[in-house]
Image (cartoon, rainbow, N blue to C red):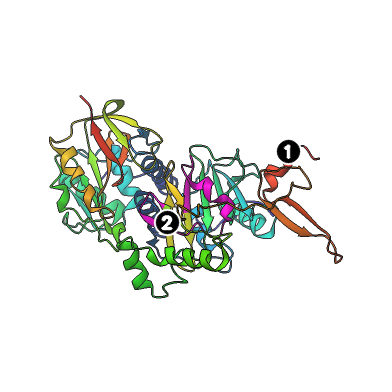
Amino acid sequence: MNAALTGYNFGYLDEATKRMIRRALLKAVCIPGHQVPFGAREMPLPYGWGTGGIQVTASVLGPDDVLKVIDQGADDTTNAVSIRRFFNRVAGVATTESTAEATIIQTRHRIPETPLSEGQILVYQVPMPEPLFRLEPRVAESTRLHAMAEYGLMQVKLYEDIARQGEVATSYNHPVMVNHRYLMSPSPIPAFDNPKMHMNAGLQLFGAGREKRIYAVPPYTDVRSLDFEDHPFKPVRAPHACAICGSEESYLDEVITDDQGGRMHVCSDTDYCASRPPV
Amino acid sequence: MTPGFDNPVLGAQSSFRAMLHALSHPGRIIRLADLPAAPAPLAPAAGAAALAMCDADTLLWHDAGEQAAAWLRFHTGAPWGAPREARFAIATGAPPPLAGFCLGSDEAPQDGATLLLQVAGLEAAAGWLLTGPGIQHETALCVTGLPPGFVAERAALGALFPRGLDIILCADALIAALPRTTSIRERA
C-alpha cells in the first residue's frame, strides 16, 4: 500500500510545472505578502482539499525531507492522512506527526503550537488568497488597490464591525499587514494563530490552487494583524482547559459528545496534546 | 558540450531549495550541493541556478560568451533576451545598469528580474550589514569583486518597491541573496 509508485516523476508534478511554481515561490519570498499568479495544475484531489498546498509541497520537497501534514491541527484526519500517504508514495519521503521532526509541514487552517525553528517550511492550503474579495469583487480593481497599498476598504469594514458589535467580528481569517506593505489573508487560521506569524523563524508559503495564487512570508518578517489604536487586535481562545492534557494555552476544538448538550474542549493540535501528560 | 546536473530532477530540486533558503535568509552564504559542469566563465553556482530555474518560458540574458550560451541553450532551452525583457540574467563581469533590467510593475512586481551576479568571493565577515525581512537582527556579508558604486546603484532602486531587482551573488559553489527588500549598510 505504501510502496513508492513507479511511473510518476519525483513528487508527482512534471519538471516544467515545478520550475514554474518554483519561480513563483522565489518571487513570493522576495515580495512578502504579494500574491504571485501561477498556472495551477489539476491535481488528483478536488479543489478545497489542498490543491494549492500540495503543489507547493511537491515543488519544494526533496528526498531528504520529513513531511508532516495537519488538517485543523490534527495529524489523523482524512485529508492529512491522504496527503501524507500521497507524498510517501509519489516521492518516497519520510513522514512524521511530530512538529519538531518535520522539515516541511503542510497545514490546513492552523499553525502548530510548537514554535517553528529556522529551516522549517510551513505550507498553507489557501481557499481564498485575496483579503479584499468580499469588499471588492473585481480582481483587476483589487490588484490595483494592492499596487497602491490602498487598504481603506478593510479598515472601514473593521470599523463597521466595531460600530455594530462593539468588537472586530472576525475570529478567523483576520487580515494581516506584511512588512508594513501588503494586506494579506492568513488563510482561514483562527485569529488566535495570527501572532505566531510575526517574526516566525520558519518560512511560510501559501498556495491557493483554485485561485491560482502563491504568496509567502519569509522568516523574521513583521506581520501585524489589522486593528485600531483604541481597539487593539485580540486573539480569541475558548476559556477552557483541554479535557485530555489540561493545557490552558493551546487552541481548543469544541467536541459535542452526545445529544444532551454534553461537550468537551480538546486541543486542536493533536501532536502538541499527545506530547503532554494526560490529566 | 559539458553535462548538466548528474540527476536533473534532484539537482534542480536541491539547487532551488538552496536559492529559496538564500532568499529567505538574505546575506547568508549557502553552498550548492549539486553542481553541473558549467563552461567558463560561468560559475558552477550560477550554472546550477540557471539550470534549475530557466526553461522555454523564461528569457535569459547573460554576458558569458558563445560556449556558455550554447551550454545554457542546450540544457535549459531558454531563449536569449535583452536585459530590459529578461526574467533571469547572469552577469559574469560588470553588469549593465541595474535600472535597465526588468523591474516589474506596481501591479505585477513579480515580473522583476532575478540577476545572478558573479563575484570573486563571499565571506560572512564585516563589510556590509544587511537588514530586512528574513534577517532577525543584522547579517554581515563581505563581498569581493563587485563593480564600484554597486551599493548606491542598488539602493536607488529601493524607492521603487514593490518593483525591483532580486540579486543572487554567486562565487564558485556559493550563493548569497539580496532580495529587493534587503537594505545594505556599508561598514569600513
Position of residue A256 in the picture relative to residue B12 (left or right): right
In the depicted structure, whether residue A122 falls above or below residue A214: above
Look at the image and tell me whether residue A59 can be seen: no
Whole-number angstrom distance, CA of label 2 to CA of label 1: 34 Å
Q: Amino acid at mark 1?
A: Arg
B180 sits left or right of A174 in the view: left
**Label 1: chain letter:** A
Q: Which residue is mark 2?
A: A215
Measured from the top left, where is residue A67 in percent x and y?
58, 46
Magenta region includes residue A202: yes
Q: Decide if residue A166 is in sight here.
A: yes
Segment colored magenta: A178-205
Q: Are marks 2 and 1 on the same chain?
A: yes
Residue most extreme to the bottom: A138
Question: Where in the figure is residue B88, as x and y percent of width and height?
Answer: 26, 52
Residue A25 rendering spot, x and y as whole percentages: 40, 53
Q: Badge 2 sits on which subunit?
A: A
Any magenta on residue A135? Answer: no
**Is there a contact, CB below 8 Å, between mark 2 and mark 1?**
no
**As shown in the figure, which amino acid type bears the numbered disc 2?**
Tyr
Q: Secondary structure at mark 2?
A: strand
Image x and y of residue A211, in percent: 46, 68
How busy is the neighbourhood of tag 2: few (under 14 within 10 Å), some, or many (20 plus)? Answer: many
Camera-near label (2 vs 1) is 1
Label 1 secondary element: loop
Q: Quadrant of the N terminus of chain A?
A: bottom right
**In what quadrant of the picture does the C terminus of chain A appear?**
top right
Quadrant position of residue A212 = bottom left
Report which residue position mark 1 lands on. A276
